Every structure is written in C-alpha cells, then in structure tokens.
Amino acid sequence: MAQINVADTIIAIRKTRDDEKHLPIIDNTRLTAVNTCPRWAGVRYGHNKIMGSGTSRALALEVGTALHHSFGAIRLHQLARNGYVDHAMHHARRLFPRDGAYEEVRSIINTARSTNEGDLTALRELGLFGIEYSRYEDDEKDKKRTRVNMEEAIIKYANRYNLSNRIWVSKQDKPEATVGIEIPFDVIIDIRARPGVSFPNYTTSPLGDEGKQIRFVGRLDGLVFDSGDNLLLEENKTTAQINATWITQWEMSHQLTGYIVVARQFAMLSCEAAEVIGLAIPQPKTSPYDGLVRVPATRSASRVNQWLQWFVNSVLDFEDATAAPLEAATFTHSCTRYFRECSMLPLCASDREEQEDIFNNQMTIQEWNPLSEDVAE
C-alpha cells in the first residue's frame, strides 16, 4: 500500500484544461472501492469490467438518480425565488434537456411567481416532475423501491424544504454562468514533492520528476449560503433506512471532505461545512428516526489534511490495482460485505489460468463515470 506523507508535498487544485481531458478520471467511488478491496477496484473501476451480462438493474442507484432530478428541480425554484429568474430558466434547460421537458419546469416556476399558488405547490410539482422525468419503472420483485414510495418521500421533502438558504451564483449578470445546483466538477489536483524530499520506500518517486496531476471528478448537489451568509455544501442521499449508524457515518466521510475542498475552488470562498439531507425510501411507518433528516458536518484544516493523505495514497493504490488487477491484494473480509456475496468471488476463487480466461473472455464492459446524467453518487 502507498505511503506518501502529504506534509512532504505541495498540492494545488485547479479546473481541468481541455488538453488534460485525456487523463484517467478518479472519483470518490473508485477510491472507496480500492480501500474496500484493491482487486475488486482494479477490475470493476480500473478496467470497467463486471461479472455476467450487466443487464440486471441496480435499483438503489436508479432511485437515487431519479430523485436527484427532483432535488435539482426543487432547487431551481429556490434559485428563482432568490431573484435569479433568468438563471433558473437557463439552468432548467441544462438539467432537463430531453424532449423540451425544461418548459414544464419553467411553467411551474412562473406559475408560482404569478399566482397565489405559492412555494409549496411549486415544490411538490417539481419534485413529482423529477420522478416522471427519470422514467423510472417499478420492478415487480421489489416492493420498497416503487414510484409510489418515491412520490410519498418527495412530497415530504418538498413540505419541509428549507427555503431560507440562498443558492450560490457565480455571476449575477450572466444566467448561463455556474450556479449551485447539480454542479459537475472536473479538477486537477497537482501534487509535487517539496524540494529536497525523497521517498525512501520507493526506488523512483511515485510523483515523478515533474509532479503528478490527478484528474478528480464528481458532482456537487447543492451549494448555498446559509442564514449567516456562510457557504454550505448540500449533499442529498437516498437510503433504505435512516438510523444512528447511517447518521454517524457522515462525521468522518471522505466524500464530504473532498467535496468541500472542491466547493472552495469553485466558489473561491471559504467553505467549512456541509449538510447531508437524507431521504428514506420507503418512508418509515414506525421508527425512532424520521424518514427525512439533515445531518450537519464541519471540516477543519486538519481534517482536510487527513483527506489529502487518504486521497493521494488511495490514488496510488488504485493505479497499482489497475495496472495489474489479478495481482492486486484481496481484502477477504469484503467478500461478503453488506451481507451478500461479492460478484467477483468466482474470479478470485479460481486458479490463475482460469482467472485470466474469466478476466479476458467472460466479463462484460460497463463504464462508470460520475459525470454521466444517469448516475447519482
């Protein structure tokens, strides 16, 4: 495993240039995967290979993607309510380009502005619109991830939506400029060794003579100013159940820390806090926890340094696993993670000759890109 001390490096973050778009992408999913099991990460995300035909549905991912359409549509109303109507109209087309669907979003927002129907009606209609736009279809084998349950949840979300925050806007006089709604990011994290520093565990520097450029991508759900004019990252998460464990995970989440770092780069403002908005599908009928929670999280400078340490070393581990996936370490405690068998188990449990045959001839290519419109992180 990689052992780079970021205190021995100089790190800078900037937007990716066009001539750097050929660089392989790194995202939170890939880095989480390599820390779960390097071989699984190298095969699944380094080579984009899966076992089987790839035709089975990932319903949790589909539900998350569908509801992210709803979250984005609801934030557009908030943007218009903040006084940026032209911005909202422009970004409706960015978020909902298919078949002129953005016109319905515009109509809902304009109707709320010109009549007495008010915010609540608009928020509910936009939430339901997002689910419809997703074209999500129920799976008869899954009685929990249904459209009815999604609709019930998004109505609750709309009823309790926090309109007191203000959507971040990069340029007030340019509607086409970036706003804090579903921001796809593509940045370079440039890391170089400090002068005179060497890495004794390596025969050659893992950062190269000219430093290392890591292309980090993802999507920020919401970027807002809170009531105290502090920049706040909002992250929407859908889940089957909200409990104490689910809430506690965000206290240490590397994803939140990394996204806060990126938010600073986008807004060129201080950002030290995030709020995770959890929505359960289906909504619980009896539970000590509500089916809609807001979990605050803050990140100090020392926490950011911890994330950078994890990020840099995880990238190096992921690159090693991608270069030689069948030689990568297997973390066998992950073979039955989440109480189910890992899909790669037939590959890993075979002898080497059979592994090569499975890897080269029996697996299906399935690309993973968090910037895809069909992916919700």
Image: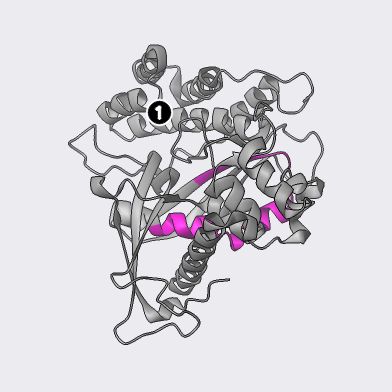
Tell me how the rendering is colored.
Answer: one colour
Secondary structure found at label 1:
helix
Image quadrant occupied by the N terminus = bottom right
* Residue 219 in the image, given as x and y percentages of width and height: 44, 43
Residue 182 is left or right of residue 310, and the answer is left
* Residue 255 in the image, given as x and y percentages of width and height: 52, 55
Residue 226 seen in the figure: no
Which of the 4 image quadrants contains residue 113?
top left
Q: Nearer the viewer, residue 324 or 285?
A: 324
Residue 236: say if magenta: yes
Q: Which residue is mark 1?
A: 77
Counting labels gives: 1
Q: Amino acid at mark 1?
A: His
Q: Residue at x 66, y 48 (%)?
A: 356
Q: Report crowding for label 1: few under 14, some 14 to 19, many 20 or more residues within 10 A (C-alpha).
A: many
Residue 74 seen in the figure: yes
Q: Residue at x 72, y 33 (%)?
A: 283
